[in-house]
Image (spheres, grey):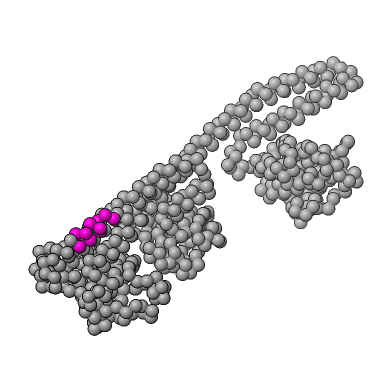
Amino acid sequence: MTDEVRPRARHRDGGPRLEADRLRALIRANAAVVEHLDLRSLLHGIIESAVTLVRARYGAIGVIGEDGGIEQFLHVGMPPEDVERIGHLPEGRGLLGALIDDPRPIRLTHITDDERSAGFPAGHPPMDSFLGVPIRVRDDVFGNLYLTDHLDGAFAPEDEELAASLAATAGIAIANARLYEESRYRELWSAATARTTHELLSRSGDESLELIADRVRGLADASLVAVLLPTPDDPTTLTVRHACGDATSGVVGLTVVVEGSLAGTAFRTAAPSLTTAIDESGYDTLLPAGEFGPAMALPLRGRDGVRGAIVVVRTAGARRFTEFDLDVAASFAGQAALALERADAAADRARVELLEDRDRIARDLHDHVIQQLFASGLSLQSIRSTLGPGPSADRVEEQIHALDATIRQIRTTIFELRQDPSAGGGLRAQIMRVAREQGSVLGLEPVVTFRGPVETMVGPDLAGDVLAVVREGLANVGRHTRSRQARLEVMADGAWVTVRVDDDGVTEDATTGAVPEPVPGHGHGLRNLRHRAQAYGGGCELQPLAPHGTRLEWRARTTKEAP
């Protein structure tokens, strides 16, 4: 290239001295270009070096996108007020587009003389001479270098050669900068993957999804990230379980059809995918139209299959996602899915260990504690039989009843210990759950006991009524002042089921035996409990207890009476 420049330069004013100056300028320009590793800084450096090298007033680089248009346009020389007045960057038409369509140098003395010129937008400063050369990275055209308004009037052939030589150096520098940027980017994703994998092991449920979404959004420079999981009982749709970023209001909980949507395609095929416009991907029903543009979908694929998908979106007009972006993000999503599986497995192991421990405690209570209490009860009964009527005999009798109540309470505890806390359970488990919920509201823990085959005698329809009675009965305790204790007893005997709720509070209603008016916010109220009982041929009574307290007793047949 320098051999070609030398003979041509002698024909310009200044002779060999000018030739040497230009060669030195080219060397300086090449050196300035290759010192940059950040791609954006490199592109600005190329433009500034080119403008200085060929003595142009304005310079620009148009980066060509996958669709063949100008994806990125960087420029120097134009005052900020002119840029603001123009309002938009070139789109790749006219002479700029001609160089894209046919990547060979274009040199013009007057821009307006060329039929390919599309003119300038309103507010654009006047430009006359033009020089454009392609920038190739390996065998692909990365973009074009545009130079306008030579300070001496027109660009000479030597200027074209110098610009082409600089563009060749720029192509090598861009390739190196890309490799550096990709290496640094991959490093960031790898570090985030390791950190996220470790943190997911100590999180569960929505916390895990939140962590994954937040990490992806930060690394991918995204405007919005949504995590979608299969919709329960509907395999044809995915539901947004977590979203972070812009315009997330109302997104969580919405559904996307698997067939034909960006997220659904990633979920169904277990392969990541890209789109340049989210509105065309089947996801547009979840986002404000026109606000979002480039997007990618990542499958949460583990050893056990695909458990969901992550949709990553940028705002309209933002830089598009590349295949490299897709590759590193998909790798992160895959590792996150594996970490979620390991976290699930760890949680399952912990649950099994807990159940085994609870089962051991339940066996010990049954085999040792209850038997010892039962033996103590028999001893007390034996002592009671030797005593005549009187205070001593009465006290022994009270202790026998207290032991019986304790045994019933321990049996209830054994039953609760043998239930899987994560499972729905039968009626007993559901009653215990309601009792705990109401206890947290009341500020006291109800003592719950069961008698008889409650599980087998109470059918599904009646079970719903029993739970409503338990909830309302315990809520009624809250109406009484100074309640310090509440007892719940559920009994199944023959054809009847009985729910009894005792408390030690004070209420005026308890002195009359009347069923008080329902309290707002406490289900259907106590009056409706009587209607529930009557539907099964039973009844509901509210009675005072001595010295103070209230007993709610609800009875119903285990089979509903015919209307």
Query: How many tags in the picture?
Result: 0
Q: Which residues are magenta?
A: 25-36
Residue 206 place in picture, x, y as percent: 53, 49
Q: Is residue 130 at least partly visible in the picture? A: no
Q: Return the residue nearer the eye: 515 or 114.
A: 114
Q: Split into 4 quadrants, where in the image is the N terminus?
A: bottom left
Residue at horizontal 79 percent and vertical 37 percent from the top: 484
Residue at horizontal 24 percent and vertical 77 percent from the top: 129
Main secondary-structure element of the magenta-colored stretch = helix
Note whether 234 is above or below 90 in the view shown.
above
Residue 191 place in picture, x, y as percent: 39, 45
Q: Return the residue nearer the eye: 484 or 416.
A: 484
Residue 35 place in picture, x, y as percent: 26, 54
Note whether 36 is above or below 475 in the view shown.
below
Residue 470 place in picture, x, y as percent: 73, 45
Residue at horizontal 72 percent and vertical 20 percent from the top: 375
